Amino acid sequence: MDIKQQLHSFDLTRTEMEALQLQLQSQIQITPYSGQPQIVAGVDLAYFDNQAIAVIVAMDVATKKVIETVSYMDTVSNDYIPGFLAFRELPLFLEAWKKLKSSPDLVFFDGNGILHPHRVGIATHASFWIDKPTIGIAKTPMIGTYQTPSPVQGSYEWIYDQDEIIGAVLRTQTDVKPVYVSVGNRVTLQNTIDFTMHWVGNKSRIPEITRQPDLLTRELRRDYLHSQKNG
DNA sequence: GCGACAG
DNA sequence: ATCTTGTCGC
C-alpha cells in the first residue's frame, strides 16, 4: 500500500499505523512561518455513545472574531490508543474540513504535534492531509522531560527527549496549570509559543482558538441529544 | 516484567 | 474523551 492510499485509510493495524507515522515523520518541515497568518482555525471533538461531533472554528487573527464554523457528526470507528489519536479523530475532522469555505493559514489542534513518540502527533499528522501549517496544544503531558515554568503568564520551559527539544510547557495564565505546546508542521517552536499566546485571554487556561470549538462542540452535542429526546 | 500513556 | 457533587473564589 503506497502512502497515497494510506492517506485515506484509517482502519490500519498498529504496525501499519506506526509505519505510516515513520513515513510522515521524515517529511516534517520545522521552518519559520512566513509573515503573519490572517485567518486561523481551531479544532475539537465531543463524543457520545459511539459517535462524535467534530467542529472547526475559523477566526480572524486581527479582530479575534469568529469568521466561520463548520461541524460534522458521525460514528467513531477507531478506539483511542495512546500515540494514535489521529487515526481516531482525523476522519471526522477531514469531513468537517471539506465543508469549510474560508481558507485558514494555520490550524490549531487539541493534542500534540511533534511532542510524540514518533514525532507525529495529531497536529503533525493532519498537516499532511490539509496541506497547512499546524500547531498542537495539549492539556496534559505525554512524553518528555522538563522543568516547571515560572508561575507568571507567558513563561515557559522546553520539553526534551534526550537532547532534542520537542515542545514547550507554557504558562497561559498566572498561577494556573500550564499547557503543552508543540510544532505541528511548517512552523517553529517559537512561532508556536507566540501564536498560542496571541489567543490567550485573561480568563481561560485554554487559548480561545481551541476553546471556541470546544465550547461549540459540547453545545451541538447537547442540542442534538435534546432534539433526539423529543421530536 | 512493570508502569506510563494526547483525547 | 466521558461519568458527576460539592465547593472555593472573584
Image: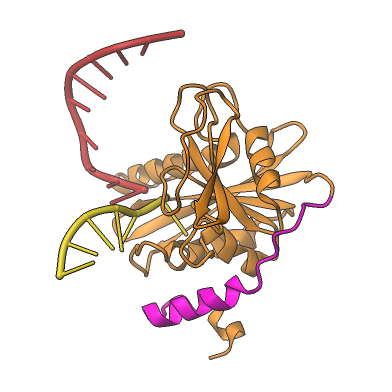
Chain colours: A orange, B yellow, C red
**Would residue A215 be counted in the magenta stretch?**
no
Q: In the rendered image, is residue A136 in sight?
A: no
Instruction: Kindly tell me whether residue A45 is visible in this rendering.
Output: yes
Q: Decide whether residue A14 is among the magenta residues.
A: yes
Q: Position of residue A203 (x, y in %)?
A: 52, 22
Q: Compared with residue A95, is residue A2 higher up or lower down, i.e. above or below? A: below
Q: Residue at x 64, y 69 (%)?
A: A128
For the magenta stretch, what is the residue range?
A9-34
Counting labels gives: 0
Horizontal side of residue A93 vs C3, given as left or right: right
Q: Closest to the observer: A24 or A72?
A: A24
Residue drawn at x 47%, y 38% is: A147
Of the pair A167 and A206, the residue shown nearer to us: A167
Q: Is residue A189 left or right of residue A13?
A: right
Residue A70 x/y as whole percent: 59, 51
Residue A4 against residue C8 in the figure, above or below: below
Q: Is residue A114 above or below residue A179?
A: below
Q: Please identify the residue farthest to the front as the structure is shown.
A: A163
Q: Quadrant of residue A2?
A: bottom right
Q: Residue at x 39, y 47 (%)?
A: A224
